Image: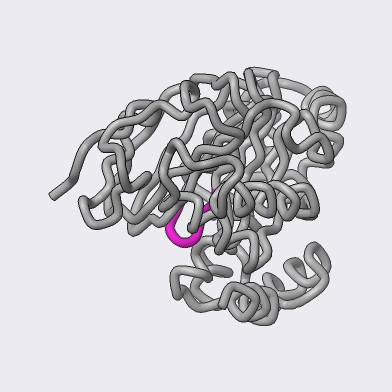
Amino acid sequence: MFGSTIACMPFFRLNDDHMNPDDLGDFDPETVPRTVAAFGGHMVTKGMELAMHEHRKDELVLTVRGIVRLEAGHGVWIVPPRCAVWIPGHVPHSVSVAGDVEMHCLFVEPDAVPALPRQCCTLTISPLLEHLLVHATHMPVMYDPDGADGRIAAVLLDQLSLAPAEELRFPMPADARLRRIASAMMTDPSDRATIEDWSRRMAVAPRTLTRILQRETGMSFGRWRQQFHILIALQRLDQGASVQAVALDLGYEGASAFVTMFRKALGKPPARYLAERRIGAH
């Protein structure tokens, strides 16, 4: 069912029809002597994970569809479709994927895009940038820097430097008690336990947990959990779940309360937010 294994991501086996770059079965983008190296494609999996690792080169992970979860630095990115995570070189990160997934990875020589931050962030990907990135996965690995593919690579980097950053991450605290709470929320997003409930479970004063969370994430407990719910909602809605179903799955009393929260956080209701992303992607 699956083709060759790509060396730098041993879990990511692509169908033969989608194996990229086109002229190599196995390749390590770290060793490619070009400004950019890209691969990507479509896979179906019940769940695969690449353990914590790092690259010399900067990396962009674009999700077109499916569930991609990435942990890096002090954050977890549950990457919404049509967004990408920017990972500067030498930042340890892990990646897990599940379901019907299409993703593309771009590796860039350090400092080739100085406009982008030197910490992980979520970038909004324009239709042009997406097309350029997908095109790059079909370019020869050893493309001619002075030829047409070299010019494509230069335009790709120019567009990447213009990509706006979004606050679409779930801050992961270093404190073990808060990480336990985060893990529980990921296991059961519908759990509506308050910070007081957690303090009782852990025999820790609520103000202690609140103070540590504020110090490590800059968020209150309610805002922290809300951020997680937004990311989960974006994934489930993009996969076709109804607003009502997502609201109930996340522990809201109904769609109205969920839509109000979503609009306050992202400036528009979920249906409009996703519709605009889908329109922009075509």
In the displayed structure image, the side of residue 144 where residue 209 appears, left or right? right
Magenta part mainly helix, strand or loop?
A: strand
Can residue 226 be spotted in the picture?
Answer: no
In the displayed structure image, the side of residue 88 where residue 167 appears, left or right? right
Q: Quadrant of residue 74?
A: top right
Q: Is residue 269 above or below residue 26?
A: below
Instruction: State the image coordinates of residue 192 (x, y, percent, origin top left).
Output: 62, 51
Q: Tell me the residue at 49%/57% (across/down).
A: 134
Instruction: State the image coordinates of residue 256 (x, y, percent, origin top left).
Output: 69, 79
Q: How is the image coloured?
A: one colour
Q: Is residue 161 above or below residue 198?
A: below
Can residue 100 be spotted in the picture?
Answer: yes
Looking at this view, is 193 or 228 the one in front?
228
Q: Tell me the residue at 44%/49% (across/down).
A: 139
Based on the picture, tell me whether residue 1 belongs to the magenta stretch.
no
Instruction: State the image coordinates of residue 158 (x, y, percent, origin top left).
Output: 75, 51
Looking at this view, is 220 or 1 the one in front?
1
How many numbered marks appear?
A: 0
Instruction: State the image coordinates of residue 168 (x, y, percent, origin top left).
Output: 70, 50
Based on the picture, tell me whether residue 64 belongs to the magenta stretch.
yes
Magenta-tinted stretch? 62-67
Q: Quadrant of residue 114?
A: top right
Q: Tell me the residue at 48%/27% (across/down).
A: 32
In the displayed structure image, the side of residue 156 where residue 166 appears, left or right? right
